[in-house]
Image (cartoon, rainbow, N blue to C red):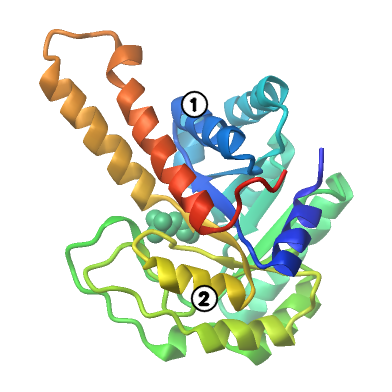
């Protein structure tokens, strides 16, 4: 199976982006892998600390292995937004392929030291594991936001800090803040494409750039971000909204139905449609 690292290198060189899709149920994992298989894209599945507490880290790893076997495509599991070194190490110990250590709320020194510790731990365990760090203050959460979020350019990732952070931590991926907001925000995000280009130009070519909070960003901005050097885009809220809406409609339409596999089938299908549309937007189709 091709490594995540070389897939990200291909994406950067050919100006397309891999998709990273968050899940919290085995059903969602199947939706991601089926959609990726159908369009010929690698599957990157993310679970935040809350999502993995719900599904279970060992279950997620066992399901990943089962899906690799069943679908014969690369399937990667990412421990998304791990807020402590301990949480990151626990996911590594369980067998995750990728860790997002997110110490961005801490000081630059603490963020650098903690991220470096995770990189060293991961490399010692398995040199193929991919580690992502984060710099900048990324606001919002993965839901439909009804309140206005104000973002200051001071919260954006600073190119010089990014350069130092990447060279000191030796991370494989860097999550940046350039006007993106977790969740579907009241006002349309306005990504700073020049800032992406600047960061891309100043950090090691070995490190991929990641755009979190992909839901609610207009298609033209996503395309410009990819051209500027983004190679991995995270999507969560768009999937949650589609899944929940389809499930609600089905529950309302079939009040006597109690077979969950029947009730949630349209929800899985709705999720798959979104994933395929995003992969098409990212240029990730037929990239296996
Ligand atoms: O890490 C997860 C993503 O950044 C999801 O963001 O809910 O705005 O799509 P989103
Ligand atoms: Zn995120």
User: Which residue is depicted at the point 46% across and 40% down?
Assistant: 51
Q: Position of residue 14 (x, y in %)?
A: 72, 65
User: Looking at the rendered structure, which numbered label has been put on residue 2?
Assistant: none
Is 263 positioned to the left or the right of 175 in the image? left
Q: Residues within 10 Å of mark 2 (few under 14, many from 20)?
A: some
**Image quadrant where residue 126 sits:** top right
Quadrant where the C terminus sits is top right
What residue sits 66% from the left and 45% below the top?
A: 286
Label 2 SS: helix
Q: Nearer the viewer, residue 87 or 56?
A: 56
Q: Quadrant of the N terminus?
A: top right
The residue where tag 2 is placed is 224
Q: Pinpoint residue 173: horizontal percent, then vertical percent.
A: 69, 65
**Circle 1 SS class:** helix
| Spot occupied by residue 111 in the image (x, y as percentages of width and height) | 63, 73
Relative image position of residue 27 (x, y in whole percent): 45, 26
* CB atoms of marks 1 and 2 within 8 Å: no
- The residue that label 1 is drawn on is 26
Front residue of this view, candidates 216 and 122:
216
Report whether 235 appears left or right of 9.
Answer: left
- For the residues labelled 1 and 2, the Cα–Cα distance comes to 33 Å
């Amino acid at each position: 199976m091709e490594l995540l690292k070389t897939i990200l290198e291909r994406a950067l060189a050919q100006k397309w982006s891999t998709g990273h899709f968050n899940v919290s149920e085995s059903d969602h994992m199947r939706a991601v892998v089926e959609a990726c298989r159908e369009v010929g894209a690698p599957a990157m599945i993310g679970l935040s600390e809350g999502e993995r507490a719900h599904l279970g880290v060992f279950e997620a790893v066992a399901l990943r292995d089962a899906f690799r076997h069943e679908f014969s495509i690369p399937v990667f599991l990412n421990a998304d937004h791990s807020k402590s070194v301990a949480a990151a190490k626990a996911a590594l110990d369980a067998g995750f392929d990728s860790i997002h250590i997110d110490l961005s709320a801490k000081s630059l020194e603490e963020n650098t030291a903690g991220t470096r510790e995770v990189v060293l731990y991961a490399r010692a365990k398995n040199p193929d594991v991919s580690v992502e760090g984060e710099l900048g203050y990324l606001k919002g959460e993965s839901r439909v936001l009804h309140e206005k979020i104000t973002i200051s350019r001071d919260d954006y990732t600073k190119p010089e800090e990014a350069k130092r952070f990447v060279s000191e931590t030796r991370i494989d991926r860097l999550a940046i803040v350039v006007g993106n907001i977790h969740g579907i925000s009241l006002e349309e995000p306005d990504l700073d494409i020049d800032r992406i280009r600047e960061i891309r130009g100043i950090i090691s070519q070995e490190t991929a750039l990641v755009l979190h909070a992909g839901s609610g960003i207009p298609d033209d901005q996503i395309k410009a971000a990819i051209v500027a050097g983004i190679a991995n885009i995270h999507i969560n809220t768009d999937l949650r909204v589609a899944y929940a809406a389809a499930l609600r409609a089905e529950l309302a339409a079939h009040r006597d139905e109690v077979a969950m596999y029947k009730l949630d089938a349209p929800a899985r299908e709705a999720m798959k449609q979104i994933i395929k549309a995003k992969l098409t937007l990212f240029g990730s189709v037929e990239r296996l």
